[in-house]
């Protein structure tokens, strides 16, 4: 009898433990599904409004919520409360958890969703410090792409991604030197109904000799799951690999490990960088808010899209949806489909995009959609309604400065919310959105490089970019933290930080010719530069074939004169960041340049007003040759120029570091092989960074004539192939960037009172007029 009681008690205890375990699993699933709503109970509307209509309670302020905007007058038909009743499930907390738009997987049970998530994120607690081998990343951050195997077929989009990595400065062909590994297996489209779906991915990746449960691997994915639920299932276990994933869900996203990337189309360009979208300077457009896209009659889809007709007025708010997609849409169409389809056909999508202030970006089948990048490209401020979406590159990008992040439950507040944004704020938002588009999203290469740079910052957190560098011009891809982690050391942040440009420069003279017995041009140049009141030192880079001349062959100067061997006897080595250069400003000079002390002083003063640009004397230009469908190069003297050659120019020393670290080795080899074009390449780089033209000072027509009359056999300018080589270089550099960064300018800055009739004794730069 006692034994029976013991067995009964044990059985009851086991049953209770099992019930507690099942209850805990359900709670865990519920918590993960609704993490977004615990932390974001109110929409994250940035401070876009001209005034606060009312103040929040102290309790809400302690919770960190922003005040909700007061309901303003609506242009929609019907009263606010009537519309609220129509969309009650979206606004009332008691119903939204089951029926609201945030329910992602209406066709699967919690247990099935948990099983999918556990399979996909076997190591869902992975972070860099637990699932990443930092030792592989010393001393260099190398990225290895597995070679394609026989029979492998990859999509054109994935080919662009792999090509971007292989052309980057991070790429290595030696897996033993790799910090990061990228699969040759196409994992972009994991929708089993898609023609791009790749079979047997699990077997193929696990057979890789360096797979190691995905450790130090990066997997790219744009589409996951399939009809009708569109879960995050990829069909294989990612293990300890990082995911660069579009439509990332915060419930499954592993912070500071995975990376959220934007969803981009197969037509997204490999390389781009030109500002081909609408000008952000226009603050007034025809429409206030627009959207044009699908709504879904079957399977999971955005409930927000199904409700847009409530706030569409056909006037300044144009929100169009269509049921006409898929093979059997007519079998499932509802009473609104025919009317919606007719309205949908009346408007051109591109015309709406480029003539609206705001563009709605609701979720589609998945959290992200193509509308996001389309809005950025069109300089249309995104209004994001996709609860639970980890926004692209949100780890480094502050989206509150470029977009409005709304809440799907508060759809009816969107019209009044957008109307309250002031014109000044619209301009700021649009300018920032255009910067982000151009810096990180305008091409596949930029999306891939941004992903790699974020990982690189994680690998060496002591040398990483801060938020200012990611969210301000020129952006994280051009502000390399290996140069400095202090933004004040970069020329493009002087104005933002209120810092004055440096007051001294270093003259860097590139020399190849032997010193002559009579006073050679380089000795005269040294004396003239050393007399400048702004000169801190002179560095002569000796790249000649003959031995370095003894110290007594060089003139005595009032500033330190250092003569050093070049980093290598190549043309590109003149831009090597030598440690001996002590100032942040460089005056770059050819050995045959002819400048007076006054010309040096005046050019330096001009540079202090344009510290991020090249400022100097010899100017050149480019043009489009339509007869040959290529870029041309000209040295004709006109009022128009796009380059200032580095034979006599000021610029910030950071560009030496950027030139030697950012430019691919293939282009540096081209420059060294031809002993030409290094000055053009520097102009391309600086214009790509600043999006500005260089600055020319005074006429200085004698610069070219003097160089050609030097009579030196080593003069590059006298070589018969010199001009043809430079024409070839211009096109090669444009292909590298994927666009033409050079901008034309007609601005020339001359000294004050330069051409007036006053006495020469009253002129500040008297010898400039004599030239």
Image (spheres, grey):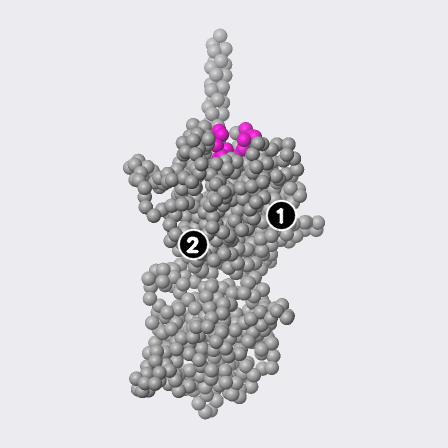
Q: Secondary structure at mark 2?
A: loop
Task: Please state the extent of the stretch shown in magenta in the rendering.
Answer: 98-109
Q: Residue at x 48, y 47 (%)?
A: 359
Q: Residue at x 41, y 48 (%)?
A: 400
Res. 605 image quadrant? bottom left
Mark whose residue sits in front, 1 or 2: 2
Q: Which residue is mark 2?
A: 283
Q: Nearer the viewer, residue 129 or 407?
A: 407
What main secondary structure does the magenta stretch of the protein show? loop
Q: Nearer the viewer, residue 461 or 331?
A: 331
Q: How many marks?
A: 2
Whole-percent x and y of residue 353?
51, 50
Q: Is residue 100 magenta?
A: yes
Q: Which residue is mark 1?
A: 186
The mark nearer the N terminus, 1 or 2, is 1
Up-down: is 285 above or below 762? Answer: above
Label 2 near label 1: C-beta < 8 Å? no
Q: Residue at x 40, y 65 (%)?
A: 491
Res. 469 image quadrant? bottom left
Up-down: is 345 above or below 457? Answer: above
Q: Residue furthest left?
A: 58
Q: Residue furthest bottom?
A: 518
The quadrant of the rendering that contains the C terminus is bottom left
Whole-percent x and y of residue 121?
53, 39
Q: Is residue 297 left or right of residue 61?
A: right
Res. 324 image quadrant? top right
Give the Cα separation between the discs numbered 1 and 2.
Answer: 42 Å
Q: Which mark is residue 558?
A: none
Whole-percent x and y of residue 680?
52, 72
Q: Secondary structure at mark 1?
A: loop
Up-down: is 564 above or below 411? Answer: below
């Amino acid at each position: 009898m006692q034994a029976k009681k013991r067995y009964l008690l044990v059985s009851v205890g086991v049953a209770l433990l099992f019930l507690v375990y099942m209850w805990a699993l359900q709670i865990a699933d519920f918590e993960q599904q609704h993490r977004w709503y615990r932390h974001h109970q109110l929409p994250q509307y940035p401070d876009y409004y001209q005034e606060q209509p009312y103040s929040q309670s102290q309790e809400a302020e302690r919770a960190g919520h922003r005040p909700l905007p007061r309901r303003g007058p609506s242009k929609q038909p019907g009263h606010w409360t009537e519309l609220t009743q129509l969309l009650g499930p979206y606004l009332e907390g008691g119903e939204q958890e089951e029926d609201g738009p945030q329910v992602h997987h209406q066709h699967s049970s919690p247990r099935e969703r948990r099983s999918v998530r556990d399979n996909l994120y076997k190591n869902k607690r992975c972070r860099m410090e637990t699932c990443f081998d930092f030792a592989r990343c010393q001393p260099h951050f190398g990225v290895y792409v597995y070679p394609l195997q026989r029979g492998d077929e990859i999509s054109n989009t994935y080919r662009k991604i792999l090509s971007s990595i292989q052309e980057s400065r991070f790429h290595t062909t030696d897996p033993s030197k790799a910090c990061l590994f990228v699969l040759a297996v196409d994992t972009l489209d994991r929708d089993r109904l898609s023609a791009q779906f790749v079979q047997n991915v699990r077997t193929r990746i696990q057979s890789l000799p360096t797979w190691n449960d995905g450790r130090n691997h990066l997997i790219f994915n744009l589409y996951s799951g399939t009809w009708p639920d569109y879960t995050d299932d990829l069909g294989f276990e990612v293990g300890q690999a990082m995911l660069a994933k579009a439509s990332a869900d915060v419930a499954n996203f592993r912070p500071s490990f995975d990376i959220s990337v934007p969803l981009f189309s197969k037509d997204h360009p490999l390389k781009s960088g030109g500002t081909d979208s609408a000008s952000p300077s226009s603050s007034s457009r025809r429409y206030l808010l627009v959207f044009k896209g699908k709504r879904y009659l079957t399977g999971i889809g955005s409930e927000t899209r199904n409700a847009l007709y409530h706030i569409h007025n056909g006037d300044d708010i144009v929100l169009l949806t269509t049921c006409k997609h898929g093979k059997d849409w007519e079998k499932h169409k509802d009473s609104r489909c025919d009317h919606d389809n007719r309205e949908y056909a009346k408007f051109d999508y591109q015309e709406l995009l480029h003539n609206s202030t705001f563009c709605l970006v609701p979720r589609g089948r998945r959290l992200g959609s193509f509308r996001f990048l389309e809005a950025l490209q069109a300089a249309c401020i995104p209004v994001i309604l996709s609860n639970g979406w980890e926004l692209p590159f949100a780890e480094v990008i502050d989206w509150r400065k470029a977009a409005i992040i709304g809440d799907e439950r508060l759809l009816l507040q969107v019209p009044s919310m957008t109307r309250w944004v002031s014109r000044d704020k619209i301009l700021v938002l649009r300018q920032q959105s255009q910067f982000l588009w151009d810096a990180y999203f305008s091409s596949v290469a930029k999306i891939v490089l941004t992903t790699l740079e974020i990982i690189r910052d994680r690998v060496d957190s002591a040398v990483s970019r801060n938020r200012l560098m990611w969210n301000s011009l020129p952006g994280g891809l051009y502000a390399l933290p290996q140069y400095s982690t202090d933004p004040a050391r970069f020329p493009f942040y002087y104005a933002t930080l209120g810092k004055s440009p440096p007051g001294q420069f270093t003259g860097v003279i590139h020399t190849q010719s032997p010193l002559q017995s009579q006073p050679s041009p380089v000795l005269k140049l040294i004396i003239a530069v050393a007399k400048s009141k702004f000169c801190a030192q002179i560095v002569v880079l000796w790249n000649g074939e003959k031995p370095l001349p003894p110290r007594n062959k060089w003139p005595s100067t009032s500033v330190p004169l250092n003569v050093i061997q070049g980093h290598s006897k190549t043309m590109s080595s003149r831009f090597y960041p030598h440690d001996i250069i002590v100032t942040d400003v460089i005056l770059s000079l050819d050995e045959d340049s002819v400048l007076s002390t006054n010309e040096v002083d005046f050019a330096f003063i001009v540079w202090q007003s344009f510290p991020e640009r090249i400022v100097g004397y010899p100017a050149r230009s480019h043009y489009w040759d339509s007869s040959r469908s290529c870029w041309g190069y000209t040295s004709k003297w006109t009022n128009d120029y796009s380059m200032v050659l580095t034979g006599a120019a000021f610029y910030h020393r950071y560009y030496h570091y950027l030139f030697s670290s950012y430019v691919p080795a293939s282009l540096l080899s081209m420059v060294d092989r031809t002993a030409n074009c290094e000055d053009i390449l520097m102009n391309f780089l600086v214009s790509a960074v600043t999006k500005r033209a260089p600055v020319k000072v005074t006429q200085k027509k004698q610069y070219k004539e003097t160089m050609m009359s030097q009579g030196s056999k080593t003069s590059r300018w006298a070589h018969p192939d010199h001009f043809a080589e430079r024409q070839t270089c211009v096109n090669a550099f444009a292909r590298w960037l994927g666009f033409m960064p050079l901008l034309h300018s007609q601005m020339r800055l001359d000294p004050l009172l330069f051409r007036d009739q006053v006495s020469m004794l009253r002129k500040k730069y008297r010898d400039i007029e004599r030239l």
